[in-house]
Amino acid sequence: MAAQRIKLTSEELGLMSLFQNVTGAGVRDCVIDNKNGRVIYVVNPGEMGKAIGKNGIVVKTLQKLVGKPVELVEYSEDPKTFIKNALDPKHVIDVRLTEKLDGSKIAVVVVAAKKKSAVVGRNGKNAEKARLLAKRYFQISNVHIVSQ
């Protein structure tokens, strides 16, 4: 299930270059999410620690340079793991992928009832991030977050 070629703008490429220079971590993708006023970086597997830095110092420096909140998601070839990473992995109990009759794919993310609002995020911005990335990488048209 290969992702289609992702087209990056020169602004996104510039932000990726900045990310690599500041963090020393490998970055796979950059999404400028103007709707939610943030920049989302997809970091190479195993490089989140380097990207965040001790006590978050590296990501804080990056946020100052970018001028808006920065969110990091660790990449995974596995769509379930990737969606889990895009949300809050410690609160996600399960991710189920379903293909509908029309060929569209959806993901159902199961979380603990007490943690659902934290996973969805204020105004649904975490859910929106998971949807955006799942569609971008795995052609998953929707991500539903449900509680147990």
Image: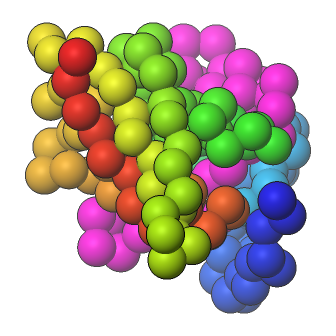
Q: Is residue 34 magenta?
A: yes
Residue at 34 percent of width and 57 percent of height: 128
Of residues 16 and 97, the one nearer the viewer is 97
Q: How many marks?
A: 0
Q: Residue at x 66, y 44 (%)?
A: 79
Q: Is residue 6 left or right of residue 122?
A: right
**Which residue occupies the extreme front position in the image?**
101
Residue 22 lies, in percent from the top left, at 75, 44
Q: Residue at x 71, y 27 (%)?
A: 48
Q: Is residue 47 above or below residue 30?
A: above
Viewer-nearest residue: 48 or 126: 126
Which percent across, then down, holds residue 118? Answer: 21, 26
Q: Which of 26/18 is in front?
A: 26
- Part of the protein shown in magenta: 30-57
- Quadrant location of the C terminus? top left
In this view, 67 is above or below 146: below
Residue 100 vs 34, above or below: the answer is above
Q: Position of residue 80 (x, y in %)?
A: 61, 36
* Residue 45 visible in the picture: yes
Left or right: 65, with 1 as reference point? left
- Camera sees residue 61: no
As for residue 47 lying within the magenta part, the answer is yes
